[in-house]
Amino acid sequence: MNIIKTLALGAGLSGLLLSAAYAEGLQGKVIGFSQIGSESGWRAAETSVTKAVATELGIDLKFADAQQKQENQIKAIRGFIAQGVDAILVAPVVATGWEEVLTEAKEANIPVVLLDRGIEGPEDLYLTSVASDQVKEGRVAGEWLVNAVADKQCNVVELQGTVGSSPAINRKQGFEEALAGKANLAIIRSQTGDFTRSKGKEVMEGFLKAEGGGANICAVYAHNDDMAVGAIQAIKDAGLKPGTDILVVSIDAVPDIFAAMVAGEANATVELTPNMAGPAFEALDAYLNGGTVPAKFIITESKLYTPADDPQGEYDRRKGLGY
Amino acid sequence: MTRPTVDLRPASLPPNPSPRPLITQLARPQVMALAAVLLVNWLLFPGFFSITWQDGRFFGSLIDVLNRGAPVAILAIGMTAVIATKGVDLSVGAVMAISGAVAAVLVTNGVSAPVAVLAALGAGLLCGLWNGILVTVLEIQPIIATLVLMVAGRGLAQLITEGTIVTFSDPVLIFIGTGSFLGFPMPVVIALVLMLAATLIVRRTALGLLIEAVGVNRSAARFAGLSANALLLIVYTFAGLCAAIAGLIVAGDIRGADANNAGLWLELDAILAVVIGGTSLMGGRFSIPMAVLGAVIIQAMNTGILISGFSPQFNLVVKSAVIIVILVLQSPLMAQAFRRRPSATPSKPGTQE
């Protein structure tokens, strides 16, 4: 099983990595990576992609899993500083409380790159941060829907993420921005599905009942793919065809949404790339070898995938990444 | 809610010649609360009570309430027994995750579905037994003893699934979560059968009486010759089994084992269902059907919020407001106020509300 996984990982990465031209520069460098933990499939994929990219670039990656605790991350970073690593990657579990340990890294002249989450504090404490733009993700999803329905009247139901979480707020905002001014599109219902499959299914069941058995619903927008997968099952249970009777658009690009696309049950997903480390290594390479200071905030691409983008291939490529 | 009394007669087995009239049964605060919640749901959404026949099964919001409430109802059945012994089981949500993970990983590795189901139930039994041993042999307080598995159990489930959502297409497992029997969803059927079986077992044998005795005073029960430890082991193991069944349902429902989220916080819903059902956390007199009714009330509320179209920020506020009202209605103070009604015959002491 492990061999298959490794093979799949290798195959998947060649697709994910855009270029390895800058690779030579980081050969043999020691880089510490303090990861939050493995609380979600995406996080596990980020870890495995980071490790694989590092192997490909010949980096000696020191990996530390913090198990969702900041004190473990601080300990790990202190450990990296003591070992005299060339650079440190941190996926910060919380936004505050980093000044002291990052100042220590700065005094030791070790560049720090933040992955996928930001921190509150002076910007000179870290070299750069690599993250996705969640508002843009929502906007890309919304723009797809605007184009897909053209001039038709379309009632949209929305499955929000956990109330108050930043992806839920931002992905909602981006989607609404894309729909602004389009008279034929309206969000008629919006509820939280807590980012989970079972809640996504339950909420969608409620929506379907409340909207004439689904007759009034033209599309469902889910803040993540897992809720969309749940919603697809609810639509099928109601005797409708997901993807045809009700359009399904979501965010994240996890393997199972591609499986749904293969079956014709999902229409579009926006990728939250697990390859945050690629741009980070690129920036570190330019900085360590050329002295080029990168932009403070590197935004990853929010790529749209539809059934036209080889969903079977994407599924196979991602399956082994630990999602 | 009655205070634990020394009166050890089982609640729903009054061998006295005059059974409680239907009207007092219906006047219970739980039944009134359910009626009120359903009424509000109907006002918010006129189609709430409409049930149609679709693809060989009933289809409608009311069916959704029962179907979605089934996992918590099943947890509540096991939880009632535990709480009646003055204990509590915080680990049932994590045990759900473990059971789903075991079943999903086994079927995806080619094990036949019946074996996978048995293994999942076995895992639940083991988890319950572990809790029981911590409570009886090591004499750890139940809230702490089961907290261990609540925290570690989810990690265990994540280890089993290797941190991913393990999806499966096994028809048997999917049937447990989404199939139907006589037009009713399988989860509802399972919950109903389990409720009837458990109620019959505790009320037609001395088991219910013994559980209440241990809950009211464990030492006194032991001195009276009861094997309190064996009883506690049985009760916690049963709670583990119930959790495993709920875990299978939840996994079958989404065709996958989601170790991170399956059963998350459902232990609290189950405890709430038991409390709404009128069983005291101090142990003693308990009622399994009322706990199941409590679970249905909670789910009726959840479903109502979903179809009401409120913004999700209000979900928890609405839910807590309704629960406060229900608990106030059940409080001893209100119960007394109801009893003082002139027309009502003075109720016998020790009779449940």
Image (tube, rainbow, N blue to C red):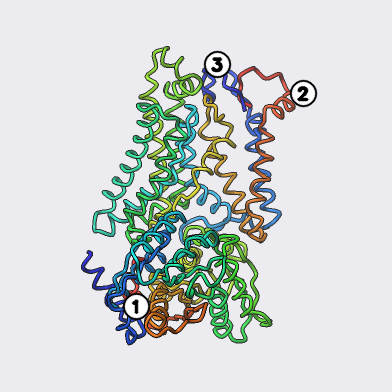
Q: Quadrant of residue A275?
A: bottom left
Chain letter behind tag 2: B
Taking the spot 34% from the left edge, 61% from the top edge, the residue there is B168
Position of the N terminus of chain B by quadrant: top right
Is residue B147 shown left or right of residue A151? left
Report the front residue among B65 and A158: A158
Quarter that holds the C terminus of chain B:
top right
Q: Nearer the viewer, mark 3 or mark 2?
A: 3
Q: CA distance from mark 3 to mark 2?
A: 27 Å
Q: In the image, is residue A178 above or below residue B256? A: below
Q: Position of residue A283 (x, y in %)?
A: 42, 80
Residue at the spot 32% in from the left edge and 82% down from the top edge = A25
**Can residue B101 be seen in this snapshot?**
yes
Q: Which mark is residue B343?
A: 2
* Dot 3 and dot 1 residues touching (CB under 8 Å): no
- Asked if both marks, 3 and 1, belong to the same chain, the answer given is no
Q: In terms of depth relative to the viewer, which is nearer, A147 or B97?
A: B97
Vertical side of A271 occupied by A20: above or below: below
Residue found at x 31% / y 76%: A12
Is A234 situated above or below B142?
Answer: below
At a point 31% along the width and 53% down the height, the residue shown is: B160
- From mark 1 to mark 2, how far is it between C-alphas? 72 Å
Q: Residue furthest front?
A: A107
**Nearer to me, B259 or B56:** B259
| Type of amino acid at the residue the image marks with label 3 | Asp
Q: Residues within 10 Å of mark 1 (few under 14, many from 20)?
A: some
Give the number of the mark in front: 1 or 2.
1
- Mark 1, residue position: A312
Task: Name the amino acid, label 1.
Answer: Gln
Q: Are marks 1 and 2 in contact (CB under 8 Å)?
A: no
